[in-house]
Every structure is written in C-alpha cells, then in structure tokens.
Amino acid sequence: MDFFGYREGKLYVEGVAAAHIAGEAGTPAYIYSKATFEHHVRRIRQAYRELETTLCFSVKACGNVSILRLMASLGSGFDIVSGGELYRVLRAGGDPAKVVYAGVGKTDREIIEGLNAGIGYFNIESEQELENLIELVKRNAPNAKPRAALRVNPDVDYKTHTFLTTGKKETKFGVDIERALAVFDRYGGNSLVRLCAIHVHLGTGGKTIDPFVDAVQKILPLIDRLREQGHTVEALDLGGGYGADYETETVPSADDYAAGIVPLLKGKDLKLILEPGKSICANAGILLTRVLYTKQGGSKKFIIVDAGMNDLIRPSLYDAFHFIWPAQVELRFVPMARSKGLEMEGCETVDVVGPICEGADFFAKDRPLPPVRRGDLVAIFTAGAYGFTMSSNYNARPRAPEILVDGDRFTIVRKRESYEDLVALES
C-alpha cells in the first residue's frame, strides 16, 4: 500500500496535490510519502513478531538524512555498504549498535570508522577481508571485540536480472557454502573478532518467496553443523531483496515472506536480521517530471520530459518497469492499479524519454498513456528506491530536489542543486 492517489483526476501525495509541490519546488523532483514508509515498517514488524528480529533499513536504497532520521525514529537499524553511508546514519541519529556493514571492498579507513563507531556486525565477504579486519582490530582497537557475520552463498537462483543476482556461486559476493565450515574452523575462535553469525543475500527484484525458503533450508544444516563443532552462531542475517510493487500486487507481501521463513526459524535460538530497502521505500517515492515536447518520429510518438537517465537510471540499466501516468487526467483515465498492460480507450502508445544525449535515455517504450501536451506533469511511480541514490550530474545536470510529505504539509529535505554546486569542488 502507498499513499499516492487520484482525487477528481488530480494526483495527491497524502494530503498534498502533486501539482502544488511542483509549483513550489519545480521539476524534476523526488517526492516521498512519510506515511508509506511508516506503513511498510509496521507491516514488516508485525509479520516477524514471533522472532527476535532486527530491521536494518538498506541505506543504499534511499539515503537522504531526513529519511534515515525517520527510519531511526521508527526503531530501525541500518544496512550500510560504505563509510559515507555510516556517516549519514550517524548524522541522522541512528544507533551504531544496530548497523550491519556489508560490501566486498571495505577499505582500511572504512573498517576503522566502523570499529570506532561500535557497529553491530561486519558482514564478511572473504577470508582475506576477515584477516584484514583482525589485523586492523589488533593495531587500532584491540579491546573492541567486534562481531562478524560470514556471508555465505547458498547457490540459490533468485530468477531476476543478471545484475541483481548475488546468491549464486559465480558472484563476487560472499563465500561458497562448502567453504564456510573451513572459515569458521580457522577463525571461529579468534580472540579479537567474534565470528558469530551467518549472512545471506540472494539479490533483489524477485517475485516469489521460494528462493528465500530454499536458502534458509540450505543454511540451517550448516548452522547446526557449526554449532555441533563448538562454534557460536547467534544470528542469521537474511539480507534484503524482498519484492516491491512496481506493478500492483505482483510480489509477495511481508506476511507472505514471513509465512515461509518464520516457521523454519522458530525454536532455532537465532536472532533474525532483515535488511529491506526497496520493499519499504520503493512505493514511498515518485519522480515528478514535466513534459517539454512531444514529437513524431516515423510511426513512433515521443514524450520528452525534463527528467533524464541521470535522475532515474533504472530503466536504462536494468530495463526496469516503472508505471508512468499524468498527474492530472480526465476521470475516465484515473488508474485503479499500476500495470504494464494498463490501457484505456483514448490512450496513445508512446516512448517516454529524457533530454540526455544518449539513446539509452528512456523511461518507457511503447507505453499506453493518456494524451499529454507540453507543460503537463507526469509521475514516474515506485521511484523511492535506487532513484535519487543512483542519480548523477551527467550532462552537467544539477540533481533533483527531494521532498518529504507528511499529511497536508511537505518539506524540501534536499535542495535542488545549482550550477554553482556542479563546480564547487573544482575551484
């Protein structure tokens, strides 16, 4: 569920008309709904209430400090993958003890920053990384006793885009499940770093709970064997990657995931860590853009908008679907659900493209849309995850503002960049 909807043909974000926000903040602009964030956090908490569960919001999905502050106020921890993300979490008032630090290439500086902050777990991706962590603790923080979770690849196919699959053997992430025993045998008794948890992350973008169930069923025998050999395994970090509704009701809900996972973990004396990102924030954001021009190219009609692939790269990078619809339409065009196949009488088949000098600069191809004209506002839905965080200044374009709506009020939580901002660090 999200809190974006049409009233008398006009798109509202909670209690605020999208057109009103555009009038104040301009376009393109990222607009987030506070109520949607809160709703998804509540659903996850409720779904996993039978287990001791720590929710760690994935900062890479939506890292605005105001959003992180909101998540911290809801009791969330954080999943980070860089020193910059740790800095953002601390600036937002996040609890470092509820931070898990993933990533295959942590630098010495970043590891030391995590040690100094007192983070909850380092998610270890290789033996060499673990050796380096031990050495850095020895030299810099011998009394820290950080906890580590070994990332294990259960060799489960998540059946998603090849760039989004991370749980197979043939990825740069983690260690093979067969090697996990040897890693624990060598490092499980280390006095400087407590290797005491297992981390699993399959990828993102899947549409079924089956891969998660398969992964847990493969990992539990490993945990049993490790414990039989005297190793401590106190927690299982099941990562993120849970589906988000890019189309209405096309992915499992939090309750659906929990129905498959919770029965397997009950009575196992394991703390559960979840690292959801897009399942919380994807539907909490839209990218609002304005039509610059329409044009005909042979048999194809183009809608050229003022947002570009530098603002939202997911369609170009992953061939990702985002539902797109005008922010004001006749009542007969008000959508009841977001769908690739949504087509109403009177729609035109168009390509929605941006102003970037790249053929890959598109948001939709051969998409049915109600007729639009120059100056109309168009909303690109489900843009709250990996939208702004993956944006860039390509073509020397200032990045869009971020706006947070709370009921009938909105706040600009990141200003639109200026031309001066583009060169500020080059002087």
Image: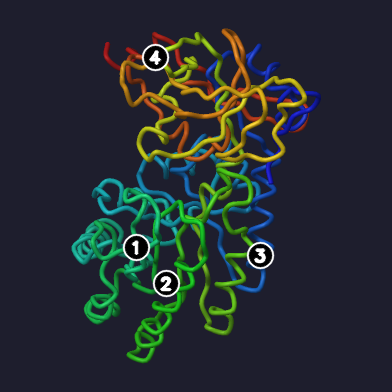
Q: Which residue is mark 2?
A: 215
Residue 8 placed where, x, y %? Answer: 81, 24
How many angstroms separate mark 4 from mark 1 (CA)? 44 Å
Three-letter amino acid code at disc 3? Ala
Counting residues from the start of the chain, the first of labels 4 and 1 encountered is: 1
212 and 59: which is toward the camera: 212
Query: Which quadrant of the structure image shows residue 409?
Result: top right
SS type, badge 1: loop
Three-letter amino acid code at disc 4? Gly
Q: Which residue is mark 3?
A: 47
Counting residues from the start of the chain, the first of labels 3 and 1 encountered is: 3
Counting residues from the start of the chain, the first of labels 3 and 2 encountered is: 3
Three-letter amino acid code at disc 1? Gly
Q: Which residue is mark 4?
A: 298
Three-letter amino acid code at disc 2? Ala
Q: Which residue is mark 1?
A: 167
Q: Are marks 2 and 1 in contact (CB under 8 Å)?
A: yes
How many angstroms separate mark 3 from mark 2 (CA)? 19 Å
Local crowd at mark 1 within 10 Å, few (<14), some, or many (≥20)?
many
How many angstroms separate mark 4 from mark 2 (CA)? 50 Å
Q: Are marks 3 and 2 in contact (CB under 8 Å)?
A: no
SS type, badge 2: helix
- Quarter occupied by the C terminus: top left
Give the residue drawn at x 79%, y 27%: 7
